[in-house]
Image (cartoon, helix red, strand yellow):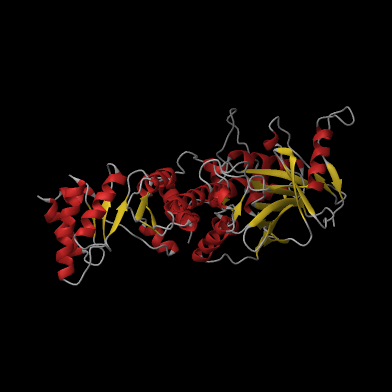
Amino acid sequence: MHWSTLISNQTEAPLALFTDLYELTMAYAHWKAGSSDQEASFHLSFREPPFRGGFTLCCGLEAAIEFLQRFRFEESALEYLRTVAGPDKRPWFERGFLEYLLGLRFTCDVDAIPEGTVVFPHEPLVRVQGPILQAQLVETALLNCVNFQSLIATKAARICQAAQGDPVIEFGLRRAQGPDGGITASRAAYIGGCASSSNVLAGKLFGIPVAGTHAHSWVMAFDTEQQAFAAYAKAMPGNCILLVDTYDSLTGVRHAVEIGRQLRAAGQTLAGVRLDSGDLAFLSIEARKILDEAGFRETAIVASSELDEHTIQSLKQQGARISVWGVGTRLVTGYENPALGGVYKLSAIRNGQGAWEYRIKLSPTAAKSTNPGILQVRRFYSSRQFLGDAIYDIHRPMPRAFTIVDPNDLTRRKRFGPETCSEDLLRPIFRGGRLEYQPPSLKAIRERARAQLAMLHPGIKRLLNPHEYPAGLELGLHRLKTELILRARGEQNGAQHNGAVNRQSE
């Protein structure tokens, strides 16, 4: 069960309407023009890593698969679409088009990079190839699935990196952007490296370990802090983590020690104390002294309070004695970078003679000019680390040695010889609308993310001013793109051109 199932069960919403209106207006226009079934290729990519970082963790494919499997227009959707009208109060969509939608089934081919893979700007994370009307209609949902989860998985990876192996608990449900935001953020955070979540429903749905302590209100409900701690320890002797900062943090630690002695006498242990405010570096150092001097060296110090990777890194540098990190708001909201900014662009269309016509969108900003072709990503690697990625067109002659060109700096190039180990990243997911991919377990995705991050040079994972990973266009594709840009700008033949170039279908 995934987020779309939750939405459907709660509201009986037809998922085909989980889209932007302009997808439907374009679909209607294709239907009117008779071009609904023209074969096209679209790619989902992003232009820069979030959080000013050096990498992104790809996430959200499982939700995208579920959406595509359930993609259809039911009668309730058509009833609503009959009411959608323009400024002239007339319905936008003809009856014949709505009847067409009722019988529509997804028949595209889909290739995608598996979840938990580290990815880089301009690389296609998803490729959709098939009837243009269908490929256009699924754009919004695919972007929604991949953008948010990739953002949160990346944030979690950065936070866990700053924690240097200490467990990180995702605490963000109450600050997440709605129920779906909370559920999907918990899943993505677990993939990114968090050890557990406070989100109980996410625990049930995905098998994520759940963790939690108690709130200040628990302590305030008693006459004294000692009474509150004693009652909680009696209720939860096997998982007793006491929040000590309701009144005075270090006094609270001393009160926790008293409870710890009682637990020890009963054969239990004081699992931890939690600090949620104040100078966490100073308080954790002093708390550690109090606990150690009392013989509670195994008791963990848990910290929360608006933490993120930068705060955690700073606390580590200050010698904080925190052993478990509870991170909420700044994790599940993608703090500092509220969206990944993924895009979904047409790159090729098949003409009436069966040849692909490659298309390109131009922009004064080089990074916003799209890449033409039917694209794949080839990753080169050694036994110890990833070396670079080449974006290439699967219908162009395959070079023996790959030279990649940085899309943002044409003078930066890197060559990979034929002896270099490599693999293609996009995998077949759907063929003709039929699922051919078995999504791995969440634990397997999480392990893939861990292994992928371990293969990155430390400089690329640096939180501030990271090295730039070598990822770019294969030289032949770069030359083709340059040719199309010149054609589109009319610099080769003195006239405006749509930027298309034909390539015979294979």
Query: At 47% from the left edge and 44% from the top edge, which residue is drawn?
Result: 334
Could you say which is closer to the camera, residue 415 or residue 185? Answer: 415
Residue 171 in sight? no
- Residue lying furthest left: 223
Q: Is residue 60 above or below residue 463?
A: below
500 lies left or right of 129: right
Residue 222 percent across, percent down from the top left = 12, 51
Residue 341 percent across, percent down from the top left = 58, 41
Residue 472 percent across, percent down from the top left = 71, 46
Could you say which is closer to the camera, residue 368 or residue 44? Answer: 368
Could you say which is closer to the camera, residue 98 or residue 343? Answer: 343
225 lies left or right of 346: left
Count of labels in the image: 0
Residue 214 percent across, percent down from the top left = 25, 54
Instruction: Place residue 424 in its image quadrant.
Output: bottom right
- Residue lying furthest right: 493
Residue 264 in sight? yes
387 lies left or right of 249: right
Could you say which is closer to the camera, residue 101 or residue 306? Answer: 306
Q: Quadrant of the C terminus?
A: bottom right
Query: At 49% from the left edge and 65% from the top edge, which residue is drawn?
Result: 443
- Residue lying furthest bottom: 267
